[in-house]
Amino acid sequence: MHYYRAHVLVCAGSVCVTSGCRAVKEAILEGITRHQLEEEIKVVETGCMGFCELGPLVVVYPEGVMYCRVKVEDAAVIVNEHLLKGRIVKHLLYQDPNTRKTVTLMKDLPFLSKQTKVAMRNAGLINPEDIEEYIAGEGYLALAKVLSSMSPEEVIIEMKKSGLRGRGGAGFLTGLKWEFTAKARGTQKYVVCNGDEGVPGVFMDRSILEGDPHSVIEAMAIAGYAVGADQGYIYVRAEYPLAVEKLRHAINQACEFGLLGENILGTGFNFEVNIRVGAGAFVCGEETALLASIEGRRGEPRPRPPFPANEGLWGKPTLINNVETLSSVPPIILKGGAWYASMGTEKSKGTKVFALTGKVNNTGLIEVPMGIPLKEIIFDIGGGILNNKKLKAVLAGGPVGGFIPAEHLNVSMDYESLAALGTLIGSGSLTVIDEDTCVVDLVKFFVEFCHEESCGKCTPCRIGTKRMLEILERITRGEGKDGDIEALEVLCDYIKNTALCGLGQSAPNPVLSMLRYFRPELEAHVRDKHCPASVCAFLFDSPCQNTAEGGVR
Amino acid sequence: MPMVTLTIDGKEVQVEQGTTVLEAAKKVNINIPTLCYLKDINVVGACRICVVEVKGARTLQAACVTPAAENMVVLTNTPAVRASRRMTLELILSNHPFECPTCVRNKNCELQSLAEAFGIREVRYSGANPVHVMDDSSVSIIRDPDKCILCRRCASVCEKVQTVSAIGPQGRGFDTVIAPGVDMVLAESNCVNCGQCVLVCPTGAIYERDQTEEVWAALADPQKHVVVQTAPSVRVAIGEMFGMEPGSVATGQMVAAIRKLGFDKVFDTDFAADLTIMEEGSELLERINNGGILPQITSCSPGWVKFIEHFYPTLLPHVSTCKSPQQMFGALAKTFYAEKAGVDPADIFSVSIMPCTAKKFEAQRPEMNASGYQDVDVALTTRELGRMLKQAGIDFNELPEENYDDPLGVSTGAAVIFGATGGVMEAALRTVYEIVTGNTLASVDFVDVRGMEGVKEATVKVGDLDVKVAVAHGLGNARKLLDALQAGEANYHFIEIMCCPGGCIGGGGQPIPTNYEIRQKRIDGIYTADEAMVLRKSHENPAIQQLYKEYLEKPLGHKSHQLLHTKYTSRGQSNQL
Ligand SMILES: Cc1cc2nc3c(=O)[nH]c(=O)nc-3n(C[C@H](O)[C@H](O)[C@H](O)COP(=O)(O)O)c2cc1C
Ligand code: SF4
Ligand code: SF4
Ligand code: SF4
Ligand code: SF4
Ligand code: FES
Ligand code: FES
């Protein structure tokens, strides 16, 4: 292999592409050519590095120096100074907004402290278009291992040992699901990867698909071997064209390398992967709706049982796993279930990717061991609250989740502890809310989201969320009346208990959470026609400029 | 089948594995309320009215889709269950017009009954509702989406039973509407007007076009000579509108009641059914003897005819050219009868009482004017007739029986059985056998073609020929036969197809409810009526014999072709849901 003196990694994730990384990359290449450095320095496009708002990002190895917000005109400087003369370009380094200190090396970013990358181990570090880079990092070794030395049962045992739980939201034990599918009767079975990722503000699945597509493909093949499936489908939302492109490319490469298709690695195991592009409705991420959508029917949930493990795609046993779940599989196979289970808490094992957004200094994707105190996420990784405002709450689970108020900041981030607080890990959305945010207004926005995303099949969700929204709209207009809060309570309880699918069942979560932690704020709206955070428009003579939507979307 | 034992409201019950909690509860005499559920057809868990508590479950469970499991403990009547059902009703009502007194389904509406049973006196929630336009484009079926509770029973029947898929959910969420397409109306769709959707709709969201006022107007017009014909299956169903047991044969009361409304003549479609057998039987024999296209397929069911025009136009040459009995009658009423009675056909107003919404479409087909006028002016359904009789204050059940008028009121048992699936086939066999062989049948009952099985087959020896026949009812079953035919696997001579499950007794214009059990009872009524007839073979009908002698000359003759036969239209498919 050719030896390069330095590697220049340019993030080509979706956000950096939008902020102009491609032009930066061209400019760097131009500089390199101009100075005839082609033989010494290699430029690599990677997937999302996780600091999207600092993009375009350029990282120069071997040192690992990270440059932020690189513009086209900065490219020449990087080439002339750093690549040619070995001098670090100070003004492009990251500056901590709190301490004003600059950080030279990517690994020293406070954002990366306390992170442990498993699912995101490759994203941002390798070129997703080059299967050899994936292979160089032990890629497809896990597949080779299971095919050559493990029985399907042993694979499932290892997965069960790992304690990995589905990262798509429900948190169901992955090994158990694999076992159910393996045991289901039927010769034709399928593996489906759920890449619908419809919760606003989360994008770890996109990051993985764009930055490390092979890890998902490899995991699907491993899963196919374990459950007895020879066909896989990856369902990706239409809003992720880059992910689709990278996946297509990766699938083709894997086929060329004999890692997909017939007789993989000469073991007689066959597995192929197809891509399906989704319609872009949140509810299409619900597994039965997703299956209907793949089959070409209206994307609508149906009652379970039968579960997909027994009757899935075209009525055949089907394993459905989330992108992040799957990308954690190869390391588990290589390092063992016990290794994975050594991280996390008793019932929530391993690591979880969160999308940290809202009023916090460092936003982006973080991968942390389960059980980490929320405080460490917000302050050590997130660098504290933006503009030194007061933390009001952290909303976990997005529009179907609930609040963690400031007084519970020490909560351990695991499935059980969050459930006890009336919220959930869900898809890993963490939105930081400061004192300027009106909870009622925010909750109204979430209810509106669920109402708009309702498929319309069942009564509680179709009509119930509408009535819930109408009450909240009245309240935030200053037209709340006696009994509104009680009416909301009854409605929430009803919808949660009666709706057909997870969307309806969890749509009341933000309202219930507000009732639990911010009742006085709600009461102030209803009784005193007063918005303590000065957000709801009825308090103002002029239209409000700082509604919650802007901050959360 | 393995059995499971569960406890429902403290009672142990054993059911086959796969049985739903809803069905299991029936075994311990608990009727869990339902709205969207339609056994075997619409099992979707959409309305959530049927929720129950299941021990260990995180949420309430919909009984209609929850399979009974070993050791399951179910509670069907707890405060939480009642509160939830009430809320479901209130939410539906918050999205529903309060129009019961002016609604076609007043006092026969599942939503209304539940609201009544649950004592809903106020609706706690109110708010905006989507505004939909009423679709009255179709001559047969009207959709009023504002009254739709989105149970989807109609769409499932249309898709699964009829395989037409003319209507289905459009749009999403709160704005969902059951419609033929996003901006499409029924008249532009593949809808065959069968009205099966009407029969299963729990509310007044989809119903027949009511034409009773047109008939009242004609009756009130001294210039008009108003004649009426009643289809075979109406006599075994109309009684239900007046509280009679399903399947009660009420021919005599019905004739008397209709006469009371002021019709000038009360005739019987059965007369035309006997005539159909003469024409269609002769057509069959001609096809068999002269190497014509076989199998021949019946043409009396207008929903079926429109179905084949849309979905299998290349098979149209198989369809008998005979008009349906309704239309044969219509053509004769304004020609043969008009001459005989000395009435100007322009003054004749011809009404039919049909079990069928598709008959409305058939009546207004432009080619149906062999008499020089629209042969049938108004086709009413059984339900519309019932309404007219109620308006007139007629004490139906107590009326002394009366007879049909002559001559278009004379008929045989072979005509009555047109009302049940297999009946046309049986009637044809009775006649074809005797005409071909010259022998008298020992028994007129061809039981192989009777009953509710979807596709029935029989082989009947007629002289030297083994006549192979098949019978299908419900368009899904029809589709199976047509697919076989297209694949070259259907070497029958004659196929009977009825659009509606059970045949006309299960037609879209029949009293609501019309379900499996009621269909069965009406079929029993049909065969009872057949047995009670003196004459049971069409060719023995003296009025038909007279008709040929005086007017038509012979089956398939020149006049017959002019008046009694028709052509079909290839329609193409307008939507595919
Ligand atoms: C309304 C709704 C939306 C969902 N959206 C997603 C999604 O976008 N991605 C996902 O992986 N799972 C989603 N899920 C969860 C899936 O139904 C399913 O549980 C998951 O894909 C299983 O994979 P896992 O076990 O690996 O988590 C959603 C569930 C609901 C109820
Ligand atoms: S809960 Fe909402 S999204 Fe789920 S099935 Fe019911 S209407 Fe559709
Ligand atoms: S559909 Fe039923 S509830 Fe609605 S207006 Fe008609 S009768 Fe009343
Ligand atoms: S009338 Fe028949 S074909 Fe038309 S929508 Fe109703 S069920 Fe479908
Ligand atoms: S039209 Fe009637 S049957 Fe169809 S979905 Fe609406 S309420 Fe149900
Ligand atoms: S897209 Fe470049 S860091 Fe996320
Ligand atoms: S009857 Fe069970 S959900 Fe509608």
Image (cartoon, coloured by chain):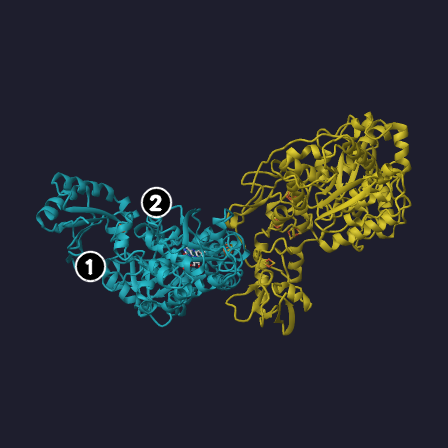
Where residue A245 is drawn, which disc sits there? 2
Which residue is found at the position 57% from the left and 61% from the top? B87
Whether the residue carrying mark 1 lies under 8 Å from ligand 6 is answered with no
Q: Secondary structure at mark 2?
A: helix
Which residue is found at the position 55% from the left and 71% from the top? B55
Give the residue pinned by disc 1: A107
The image quarter containing residue B498 is: top right
Where residue B383 is drawn, which disc sits there? none
Question: In the rendering, at what x and y percent does residue A409 appear?
Answer: 31, 68
For residue B247, side relative to residue A342 (left or right): right
Q: Colour of chain B?
A: yellow
Q: Secondary structure at mark 1?
A: helix
For residue A53, side relative to residue B513 (left or right): left
Question: Within 10 Å of the Cα at label 2, are there few (<14), some (14-19), or many (20+) other Cα atoms?
Answer: few
Whether B229 is drawn above or below A190: the answer is above
The three-letter amino acid code for the residue at tag 1 is Lys
Front of the two marks 2 and 1: 2
Q: Colour of chain A?
A: cyan
In three-dimensional space, the C-alpha distance between marks 2 and 1, rounded to whole angstroms, equals: 29 Å
Question: Within 10 Å of the Cα at label 1, are there few (<14), some (14-19), or many (20+) other Cα atoms?
Answer: some
Question: In the rendering, at what x and y percent does residue B230 appear?
Answer: 81, 41
Among numbered discs 2 and 1, the one appearing first in the sequence: 1
